[in-house]
Amino acid sequence: MKIRIAFFDSGIGGLSVLHRALKILPHEKFIFFADEDHVPYGTKSREEVLNFTDSAFKFLTSRNVKAIVVACNTATSAAVREMRARYSIPIIGMEPAVKKALELFPRQKILVIATPITIHGDKLHQLIDRYDSEHRTELLALPKLVDFAERQEFASIAVKKYLEDQFAAFNFENFGAIVLGCTHFNYFKDVLREILPSRMKFVDGSDGTINELIRQLGTNLIIGGSDSNSDSQVEFYFSERPVVESKDLNRIKKFLERLDSMEKIE
């Protein structure tokens, strides 16, 4: 029997996590909630993000979901602790895959790119303190990349210039990985691949998040089988509005198609 699992993000970045879930858990029923009324979260105050997240959780729990995946590093950093205190269902958060990147490249630096809230938040710095005693982690906030993603501007001259300008301060000679610390950033792997040295690998937290979802829900889930990204498995909401217009559904379809192609880039 299918159970209903919610995926929540400030915008369409969380589709990259849902995209992985649809491949690994193709028999489950999902709700995807993009808070399009308030995107981006990364440049807002922590209190604002906390309030937006709580409103979304109230809506999603009223839909009888059995778990909520906070497919947003910013909302996880700012609000997941409070949400776990307020709601009794399993809540799975996202965090930049710092530990994974450091383990994969034990003698090289890593660069974490994320939103300002994530970069400056206690959660990320506690994570780095726990796993990076050698101080090999560099941080970079890329807030404009969220705006580019939301308007489906992925490989324009403006995107490339923005990234090149932001990366200009780094000498990547001794870097092994770039950690995609915002789910919106998964849409830009091809452009990042053009700009960064080929030896630098992409690391993100999507698989770890889905693994934690499976661990918490256990035998209630059916794993594997068809990897179809059928829209019939997912109810989409922009803030609290059901996504039913063909133009909006087509927009989501284009994002998912983009993710299909980005998945092949390492």
Image: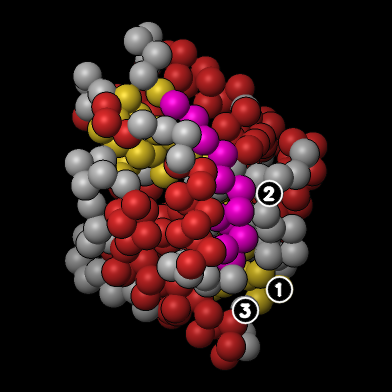
Q: Residues within 10 Å of mark 3 (few under 14, many from 20)?
A: some
- Whether 232 is drawn above or below 104: the answer is below
Residue at x 34% of width, y 52% of height: 195
Given contact means CB atoms under 8 Å apart, are the residues at marks 3 and 1 in contact?
yes
Tell me what residue is drawn at x 45 percent, y 41 percent.
167
Q: Nearer the viewer, mark 3 or mark 2?
A: 2
Label located before the other in sequence (1 or 2): 2
Q: Label 1 amino acid?
A: Arg
Disc 3 from disc 2: Cα separation = 21 Å
Helix, strand or loop under label 3? loop
Of 155 and 125, nearer the camera is 155
- The residue type indicated by label 2 comes to Tyr
Highlighted magenta segment, given as a residue range: 138-150
Amino acid type at image mark 3: Val
Instruction: Provide residue 50's location: percent of width, then percent of height.
Output: 74, 40
Q: Which residue is identified by label 1?
A: 241
In the depicted structure, whether residue 156 falls above or below residue 72: below
Q: Quadrant of residue 117?
A: top right
Determine the residue located farthest toward the bottom in the rendered image: 246
Q: Position of residue 201 (x, y in %)?
A: 25, 42
Quadrant holding the N terminus: bottom left
Among the 4 quarters of the image, the one containing residue 116 = top right
The residue where tag 2 is placed is 41
Q: Position of residue 246 (x, y in %)?
A: 57, 90
Q: Does 150 sit above or below residue 246?
A: above
Residue receiving disc 3: 243
Q: The residue tagged with tag 1: helix, strand or loop?
A: strand
The answer to whether residue 24 is left or right of residue 10 is: left
